[in-house]
Amino acid sequence: MMKIMPKEIIVVLDSNELIFGLIGKEQYPKILIGNLNKLKLNCSFRINRQIVKEVLDNIPNYHHGKFFRLIDYGIIKYDSKIIDKNLLNKYSNLKLKKGDNVIAAYAESVKAKTLISENRHFLKELKTRKFKIVNAEQFLKDILK
């Protein structure tokens, strides 16, 4: 008898979650990033080139190793694929900032269930049915139910 594995829950981490979780003082992003290794048993956390660039541009060099260990140890999956231009244009037309349109397009392209972000533009302004947008606090509450 073949065992059917549950479908993987894909979660995209916005750069601000990683930045706040690694060097910030915000409670829930720190809890989220600190517990990714446990949470990855239920979720596949994903990032792309845009997210890596934003994180590296905004954390001190001495934290880069900690960030790359999350990727190297497979806690976060790094995706280097190019996003389809039509998908990028779709989110650009929604008046998202340049980096935000790439992240939203990426979330849709990997069929993410959730995008975790503290970004008010995502949380309040982006309306999509392709994925849910929540902050770290809401994500942790949802996953612990």
Image (cartoon, rainbow, N blue to C red):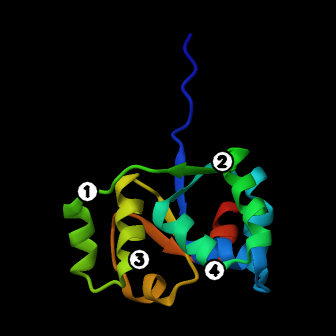
Q: Which residue is mark 3?
A: 99
Identify the amino acid type marked 4: Asn
Mark 2 lies on a secondary structure that is loop
Q: How dense is the environment of label 1, judged by Cα within 10 Å: few (below 14), some, or many (20 and up)?
A: few
Q: Which residue is mark 2?
A: 42
| Cα gap from disc 2 to disc 4, whole angstroms | 29 Å
Choose mark 4 or mark 3, whichever is in front: 4
Choose mark 2 or mark 3, whichever is in front: 3
Front residue of 138 and 54 = 54
Identify the amino acid type marked 1: Asp
The number of numbered discs placed on residues in the rendered structure image is: 4
Identify the amino acid type marked 3: Gly
Residue at image point 67% right, 76% down: 19
Q: Which residue is mark 4?
A: 58
| Cα gap from disc 1 to disc 3, whole angstroms | 15 Å
Q: Is residue 112 left or right of residue 93?
A: right
Identify the amino acid type marked 2: Asn
Q: Is residue 35 left or right of residue 98?
A: right
Front residue of 14 and 44 = 14
Q: How dense is the environment of label 4, judged by Cα within 10 Å: few (below 14), some, or many (20 and up)?
A: some
Are circles 1 and 3 on residues that touch, CB within 8 Å? no
Numbered tag placed on residue 84 in the rendering: 1
